Amino acid sequence: MNIPLFNKLQQEGLLSASSLEKIHAQKGKQLFSLHWEIRTILYLGILLLTGGLGILVYKNIDSLSHQVVLLFIGLICGGSFFYCFKKKLPFSNGKVKAPNALFDYILLLGCLTFIIFIAYFQYQYNIFGNRYGLATFLPMTVLFFTAYYFDHLGILSLAITNLAAWLGISVTPLQVLEANDFNNNTIILTGVLLGIFLVTMGLVSLQKNIKAHFEFTYTNFGIHILFISLLAAMFQFSNIHLLIFLLLVAVAFYFYSRAKKEQSFYLLLVSTLYTYIGLCYVVIHALSYSLNSGMGSIYLGFIYFIASGIGLVLFLMRTNKKLKAS
Amino acid sequence: MIAYNKTWLYNLFVQSEAETAYNESCITREEKECIVVKYPAAFYTPNIFIRIGLFILTIIILIFSFGLIALLFWSAAKASVSGLAIFFAIIAFAAMEYMLQRKKHYQSGVDDALLWIAAISLFCGIVLPNNFDELTTCLVGFIITLICTTRYADRLMAATCFLSFLGIVFFISMNIGGFVKAIVPFIVMAISLVTYILAKKKNDTETFNVYGQCLVIIEIVSLFTLYAAGNYWVVRELSNSMFNLHLQPGQSIPFGFVFWGFTIFIPLFYLFLGIKKKDAVLLRVGLILVAAIVFTVRYYHTVLAIEIAMLLAGSIMIVIAWTLTRYLRVPKHGFTQQELNSRNVMDNMHIESLILAETFSQQPQTTEGTKFGGGSFGGAGASGDF
């Protein structure tokens, strides 16, 4: 805090003497927080440790004694979970704070080693046989349980990712577009259903007041999966793309009204941009069919992009005002 | 000079200081509101997400406007693409000024997009058709970014400006050759150091500075360039290609040990200074550069197998974090492990949990277990289709 500035403000009569006193006192005992630095180091440490562990197991799978490896991983996993069970605060449907700064990360370490443990078991002893679904299903249930039981948003995200993997799609932010084959009809349909399911889960958490703060994570995954799958459906089934576009607009309208109600600029932006992509597809599709000769359609296309861009800018600015005002 | 209303910028600064004081419950709500009324800033600055949206849309509008202009004046455009680009840049700058002066935009996404498109098309318009050498290219970039920084106080512009200045110095030294060419790492280091000290001094005073945020960025970038210029890997590989040394793997450059010294001790020195002066910039840059030490050493000397190194490093980092948290449970020497301001943007967005899902997502049925990729979070996942 800038002391000369506050002195000046006090002289102008905007601050009481006691407030200024408080500011001076605060400045004197101002602490330097290492919170994010420590967290980053811890996070990277866990990342490196589990990564190294994974590679170690992978490389030595033939030479190591399996029991030793399993024991080692199991010990880390068990130790972490033991610590968490001992330290955790009592369960509640509301938000439960972590007992200390390290708790969340140790829980994370436990979950990650658990996943490695199961995967190793499956690889080596084939405990689930060829029922690969089960090999994903078990970690997923454990992750969901852990997320709710210990109240951990990160593990909830992991669990959702696992749920999607169990259904055969990849939903992590960077891989959602690359890793999925959106030319596959089943994947598109699964994506739409999963998106709807996750958004509903978000609503249910909110309404039943079971871990209401999980709502954002559910909705966030859900909205992206839903919109991307709908767009993929538009591109894939181009003969009925207008119908799907209407569906997309309906979904977008739903999120738009939710954005207004919850004053969420994020939901507003996401649904606007996805709808815009859909709209552009429809317009270009129409242009390329109706005016498939000469420069006319190209000119129209350019003008459409400029006009729609300006229109959307105005729309966003106006909605921004509305959301701020309410 | 600066295009934005200076008084309003100052008022914004006063408002944010009042906000901090309010968050630390030093001043009452009424006092804060009084201050905001007394120091108004009528800029148009929307919410960050709206800003992102406006930024994307403005870029779309500009690109298609450029295309439309090119189509309309096709015969002229064919003759001189660079003329067209410069013409377009002038239009974009004019639109920028209009948005700032009339519509009072400030960090709205519209002005960011206009500024960058205008600067880039001006740069391309001048550089592309002329086949300039590197020095002139850097010079053009430097002049454009310098003007943009002084007029619009954009942080990224400031960083680019500093980098292109270093580029100029580098290529001038290359052209002089001989002794100057040989000591170019030291020249770059010296300039970075001087820049850092100047920026720090200019920004440390308690008076308000319009370019404050630019100066912080320049501090960060100059710390990085100071390190990069002395880093063994950078110096070895660059001089290998610049001086045609044809070094064999395992061969060192002349005075290699000096650069090894820089590689290892500069980050530690940053850390030391950062802790001593309680300077977040120095501390964080130092922490990042510790990773650079590890990568540089591992590039030339395979000390340990990768997985053992990862296991060791991971364990050490966990232990360090653990010890620090325990040690700072009660604040010591003015340090704390607690978060100071609970209204953290990071928490609201649950960024941590998203990064988690990205980095730790794994393919089951393989023992490899963890597939950790970049570890960065690529925006909202939207707009990938443009």
Image: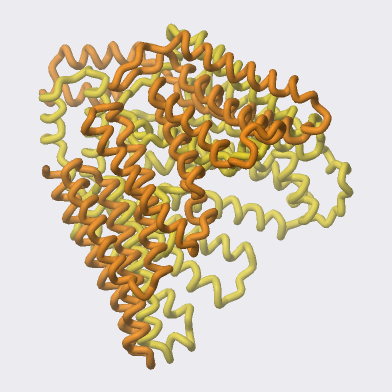
Chain colours: A orange, B yellow
Measuring 51% from the left and 55% from the top, which residue is drawn there? A180
Residue B367 placement: quadrant: top right
Horizontal arrangement in the rendering, residue B299 relative to residue B50 (left or right)? right
Q: Nearer the viewer, residue A149 or B173?
A: A149
Front-most of B221 and A113? A113
Front residue (pair B354, B281): B354
- Residue at 66% x, 57% y: name it: B172
Residue A165: x and y in percent read 51, 44
Q: Quadrant of residue A201?
A: top left
Residue A46 against residue A129 in the figure, above or below: above
Residue A22 horizontal/vertical position (percent): 23, 13
Could one spot residue A325 in this view of the protein? yes
Instruction: Using the rendered view, name the quadrant where residue B385 is placed.
Output: bottom left
Q: Is residue A3 above or below residue B251?
A: above
- Residue at image position (20%, 60%) is A315
Residue B228 vs residue A287: left or right?
Answer: right
Seen in the picture, residue B85 relative to B373 is either above or below; the reply is: below
In the image, B238: left or right of B159?
right
Res B195 seen here: no
Where B231 falls versus B128 (above or below)? above
x%, y% of residue B307?
A: 73, 31
Q: Quadrant of the C terminus of chain B?
A: bottom left
